[in-house]
Amino acid sequence: MGGLAGAALAVVLYYFEYSSITRALSERAKRLHVKKVEMDGSERARLKNLLWFCILMPAIGAGLGWLLG
């Protein structure tokens, strides 16, 4: 049960972070008066690091569920 909760939380967390970064990209494009701006290295690194955390999140949730249950 904790693994499912961790997986759901990981999906939601990644979705909100990705949407936040894409919103910042569109605002940057608007500010620079260009049509499209690509992600820079720090934004790619944030998503990559968050992806690794989201992959581990179901295992962490399952472990906590096992310990508490």
Image (spheres, grey):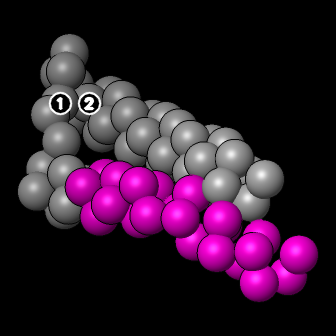
The stretch drawn in magenta includes residue 67:
yes
Image position of 57 (left or right of 37): right
Amino acid type, residue under disc 2 in the picture: Ala
User: Looking at this rendering, what residue extends furthest in the right direction?
Assistant: 69
Spot occupied by residue 62 in the image (x, y as percentages of width and height): 66, 65
Tell me if I can see residue 4 in this picture: yes
Q: Quadrant of the C terminus?
A: bottom right
The stretch drawn in magenta includes residue 68:
yes
Q: In the image, which is nearer the foreground, mark 2 or mark 1? A: 1
Amino acid type, residue under disc 1 in the picture: Val
Name the residue carrying label 1. 37
Residue sitting at x 14%, y 34%: 38
Spot occupied by residue 59 in the image (x, y as percentages of width and height): 53, 64
| Mark 2 or 1, nearer chain start | 2
Real-space CA distance between mark 2 and mark 1, rounded to the nearest whole angstrom = 5 Å
Spot occupied by residue 36 in the image (x, y as percentages of width and height): 19, 21
Crowd tier of the residue under label 1, counting other residues whose Cα lies within 10 Å: few below 14, some 14–19, many 20 or above = some
Q: In the picture, residue 39 is in which quadrant?
A: top left
Which portion, as a residue range, is magenta?
47-69
Q: Main secondary structure of the magenta part?
A: helix
Residue sitting at x 11%, y 57%: 41
Residue sitting at x 64%, y 75%: 63
Question: Is 57 or 64 nearer to us in this picture?
Answer: 64
The disc at residue 29 is 2
Q: Is residue 67 above or below residue 7?
A: below
Q: Secondary structure at mark 2?
A: helix
Q: Secondary structure at mark 1?
A: loop
User: Looking at this rendering, what residue extends furthest in the top direction?
Assistant: 35
Q: In the picture, residue 33 is in which quadrant?
A: top left
Q: Is residue 29 above or below residue 46?
A: above
Question: Is 58 or 10 nearer to us in this picture?
Answer: 58
User: Looking at this rendering, what residue extends furthest in the bottom direction?
Assistant: 67
